[in-house]
Amino acid sequence: MREITVLSGGIGGARFLQGLLHALRSGLVPGAAPDARVTVVANTADDLWLHGLKVCPDLDTVMYTLGDGIDTDRGWGRREETWSAKEELAAYGVEPTWFGLGDRDLATHLVRTQMLDAGYPLSEVTEALCRRWQPGVRLLPMSDDRVETHIAIADPDSASGRRVVHFQEYWVRLRAEVPAEAVVVVGLDDSSPAPGVVDAITDADLVVVPPSNPVVSVGTILGVPRIREAVRATKAPVVGVSPIVGGTHVRGMAQQLLTAIGVPVTASGVALHYGARSADGVLDGWLVGDVDAALVPEVRAAGIACAAVPL
Ligand code: FO1
């Protein structure tokens, strides 16, 4: 195995990638060359424009985590961060004040926005930023097109009884504490895979679905036209790791969003949501936590190889 492709969101995917790279480079992955190339296809639907800057949380979380610049307690943003610009913006009463842009992190968004304004596509911007961070993977945005996840929530004050907020407002300001009624990914149907994404999937020796959010991370990547087809067509085995262990997510808001789309919040529910490649889905194999061993038969019955391991 020389080419491994991982479809990743933010914090969960980045931490999985840290483990994968450590195992690979230590020669612990049977059948994989220690210098196997890892390509990360990252979700960009969490992206947002803030104070005139393009912020790409999942791309930056993977880049900072694997480039050793991440704040390990928060799991996002830079370590040794300062917040002077954020404090000054708040002093001016500039909204949103609920999204923390650190001074060091701002430099990334300034460089990215300047390059986007100069006409470089997000994929080339990401490649340029990675020349500094050297994450040890090829980091590709799922698309160079603008795609944004918005969440419909109940709003008794509005005529329709609901309103739509950007995913980051739902997650960061509302802490996913209001029921999500629908997930709307703006621009997804008109988006195209970024250069190299389809080939990275079809030419891989292994495709991995890490424990990222099945709805707003893996779900949005698979929702980019042609990406799901590439996963279904690849010669590589497609193996996933359950983000749900013991009936709940490890962190984040997968529980709330799976509920919003009617998927059971179980290790088997997510596997069946992704589906077996032999049916109409994308998975050949699925790993569940030891605590979920009782769910293995249900996953196997759906045509997906399955094992319970200490996730
Ligand atoms: N998450 C928070 O909970 N609070 C924040 O203020 C915040 C700021 C932020 C800034 C840059 C960035 O790349 C990520 C940031 N995140 C923050 C995390 C972000 O909401 C999540 O990492 C992803 O969008 C979900 O995976």
Image (cartoon, rainbow, N blue to C red):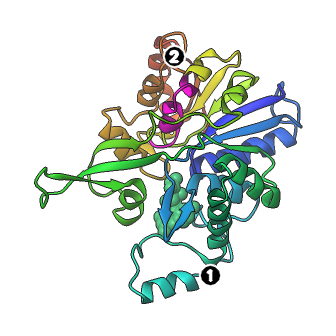
In the displayed structure image, the side of residue 289 where residue 33 appears, left or right: right
Report the residue at 49% width, 42% height from top: 213
Residue 83 counted in the magenta span? no
The image shows residue 222, relative to residue 178, as above or below, that is: above
Q: Determine whether 19 is above or below 298 in the image.
A: below
Judged left or right of residue 118, residue 91 is: left
**Residue range highlighted in magenta:** 216-228
Q: Position of residue 200 (x, y in %)?
A: 72, 30
Which residue is found at the position 81% from the left and 48% from the top?
A: 136
Residue located 75% across and 31% down the image: 4
Residue 227 visible? The answer is yes
Is 53 positioned to the left or the right of 62 in the image?
Answer: left
In the picture as drawn, the residue positioned furthest to the front comes out as 118
Q: Is residue 90 left or right of residue 35?
A: left
Residue 239 or residue 103, whichever sits in front: 103
Q: Which residue is mark 1?
A: 82
Q: Quadrant of residue 206?
A: top right
Type of residue at label 1?
Thr
Q: Is residue 218 magenta?
A: yes
Judge depth for marks 1 and 2 and give the one in front: 1
